[in-house]
Image: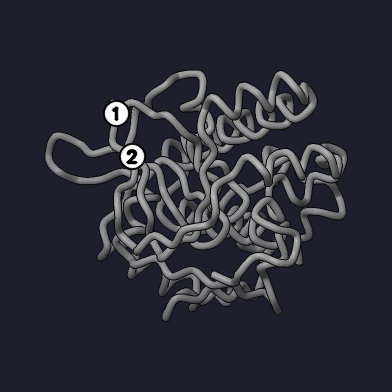
Amino acid sequence: MGGHDGGGKTADFLRGRRRRELSAEERAALEGALSAPVTLPARRTIVRHGEPVKHSTLLISGIMCRYMDARDGYRQLVSLELPGDFVDLHGYPLQRLDHDLATLTECVVATVPHERLTELIEAFPHLGRLMWFSSLLDAAMHREWIFRLGRLESTGRLAHLLCETYTRLAAIGRVEDGGFEFPLTQQDMGEACGLTSVHINRTVRRLREAGLAEVGKGQVRIFDFAGLAVLGEFGGEYLYLDEEGGPTP
C-alpha cells in the first residue's frame, strides 16, 4: 500500500477527521514518543492472545488484522487495520489483548511504550481524548462487522467490506479513480466475511458480472459505489469522518 506522505509517522492518524485534528504541539509530542519506523514481513503474528502488552503500535503503511482462532483451526478476522491506525491502543489500559494481531502485507510500524503514553496523556489531555476517540472508532467498526456477519448474505458481506475499506482509504488519500490496493487473498476475504474461499470466488464473480466492482490481482476497482452500498447496506456514519475527509464517489 502506498507510503505515507511528508507529515511524518503520524501523517494518517485520525486523518479525515479534521474537527479532532491534533495540534502541532500534540503531533510533535506524539512523533517524539514513537520509535523509528521498522518494516515487518507479511503474515507475521506480532501479538498473541493473552500476552502482556507493554507498548502500542501505529501502522504507517500496509494492512494488518486482528483475528481469533476457532477450536477447529479456522481463523476469523475481526478487523482490518489500515495506515494511521493505532492497532493495539486498547492494550494500553487492558495490558493484554483478547485476540491475535498480525500483518497481512509487509507493514511499516512505529511503537510507543505505555509509560510514555501515560506521560503524553498527562501532559496533553486533549491528545488523550483523541486516543480514546480512536479506540471508540474501533468499537464502532466492530459493531458494524457484527451486523454484517449476522444479517447480510454473502454478496452483501463482501460489498460492505469493500465499501468500508474504500471509504477508510479514501479518507487518507489512498484511492485513485475508484481503485485501491487490496492485496488480500480470497482466504483472507473469506475469513473477514465468514465465508469459504470457494464462496468468495463466486461472490467476486457476481459483483463483477453485476457491474459493481472488480476484485483481483491485489486491486479493487469500484464501478458503482452507490449500488455496492445498497447491496451491502453500508452507511459510513459509524466511521465518523468529516465531510471533507470521507469522500465517496
Q: Residue at x 62, y 61 (%)?
A: 166
Compared to residue 17, the image places residue 121 above or below, namely above
Which quadrant of the figure contains the N terminus? Answer: bottom right
Which residue sits furthest left? 72
* Residue marked by disc 1: 51
Q: Is residue 71 above or below residue 85?
A: above
The picture places residue 175, in percent across and down from the top left corner, at 67, 70
Residue 83, image quadrant: bottom right
Residue 178 percent coordinates (x, y): 67, 74
Circle 2 sits in a helix, a strand or a loop, which is it?
A: strand
Please give the name of the residue rendered at 42% of the width and 21% of the height, measured from the top-left corner. 95
Foreground of the two, 58 or 234: 58
Q: Is residue 216 left or right of residue 245?
A: left
Quadrant of the snapshot with the C terminus: bottom right
* Marks 2 and 1 in Cβ contact (< 8 Å): yes
- Measured in 3D between alpha carbons, the distance from the residue under mark 2 to the one under mark 1, in whole angstroms, is 7 Å
Q: Is 99 placed left or right of 120 in the picture?
A: left
Question: How many C-alpha atoms fall within 10 Å of the one at disc 1: few (<14), some, or many (≥20)?
Answer: few
Residue 208 percent location from the top left of the image = 49, 76
Amino acid type at image mark 1: Glu
Is 153 left or right of 87, judged from the image as shown? Answer: left
Give the total number of marks visible in the rendering: 2
Residue at position x 56%, y 52% in the image: 232
Q: Residues within 10 Å of mark 2 (few under 14, many from 20)?
A: some
Which residue occupies the foreground of this view, 100 or 34? 34
Q: Amino acid at mark 2?
A: Val
Q: Which residue is mark 2?
A: 47
Residue 222 falls in which quadrant of the image? bottom right
- Which secondary structure, mark 1? loop
* Picture layout, residue 38 above or below residue 31: below
Residue 93 location (% of width, % of height): 51, 19
Label number found at residue 174:
none
